[in-house]
Image: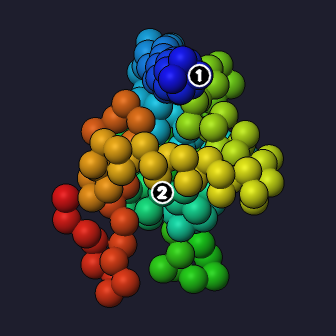
Amino acid sequence: MAKKSAMVSEIIDNIRRVFQVVNEQSKKARRETGLTGPQLWAIKTIAESFPVRVSELARRMYLHPATVVGILNRLELQGMIKRVRTNGDRRVVNVELTDAGNELVAKAPQVAQGLLVAGLKELSIEKLQEISAGLEVLVNILGVQELPPQLILSPEVNLPLQAAGTIKKP
C-alpha cells in the first residue's frame, strides 16, 4: 500500500511540474512578447521554414487548420505575419513573418508546446504508445474524453474533424 501511495504522489507531483513549467513559460512569453503561447509557437514555427502554407503550419503544430487560421488572424492584426498568394496558383496562400515578426522571434523565449513536441518526436514509437496509453487513462479518470482540447493556457480550442469533414461541436 505504501508503494502505491508513493507512486500516486509521484504522478501527481509530475503533473504539477508540467503545469508549472507551461504556466511559467506562458507568462514569460506574454510578458516579453505580448503574445499568447500558441501565437508565439506559431511565429517560431513559421520562422523555421517560411514561407509556409497554413496546412503545413497546422501539421507542424499538431493543430487543425481552422485553429491555426484563428491564431494567424490575430497575428496578422498585430502586424507579425503576412499572407502572400503564390504566383503559380493564386488559390495557394503562404504565411511569412513581417519585419516585426522576425524581430520578435529573435528575442522571444522558448515555448513549452514547442519543447514538448520536439522532445516527443525524439522518442521511439513504443515510448510514445506508453505515454499515450497513460494519458488516456488520466483522461478517463477525469471523465473528459469528450472535452474539446483547448490549447495550453489559451482560449483557442483544437476541434477535431469528424469523418464527414465537419467540425465537432463542444
Please tell me which residue lies in front, 84 or 150. 150
- Measured from the top left, where is residue 106 in percent x and y? 68, 25
Extreme-front residue of the structure: 1
Give residue 78's quadrant in the image: top left
**Sequence-wise, which precedes: disc 2 or disc 1?**
1
Q: Which label number is shown at residue 63?
A: 2
Residue occupied by mark 1: 3
In the rendered image, the quadrant that contains the C terminus is bottom left
Give residue 51's quadrant in the image: bottom right
For residue 106, above or below residue 143 = above
What residue do we see at 41% from left, 36% from top? 152
- Quick check: 10 left or right of 158? right
What residue do we see at 57% from left, 83% from top? 89
Give residue 119's quadrant in the image: top right
Q: Which label number is shown at residue 55?
A: none
Check contact, mark 2 vs mark 1: CB within 8 A: no
Task: Note whether residue 134 is visible.
Answer: yes
- Quick check: 145 left or right of 100? left
- Measured from the top left, where is residue 97 in percent x and y? 58, 44
Please tell me which residue lies in front, 2 or 15. 2
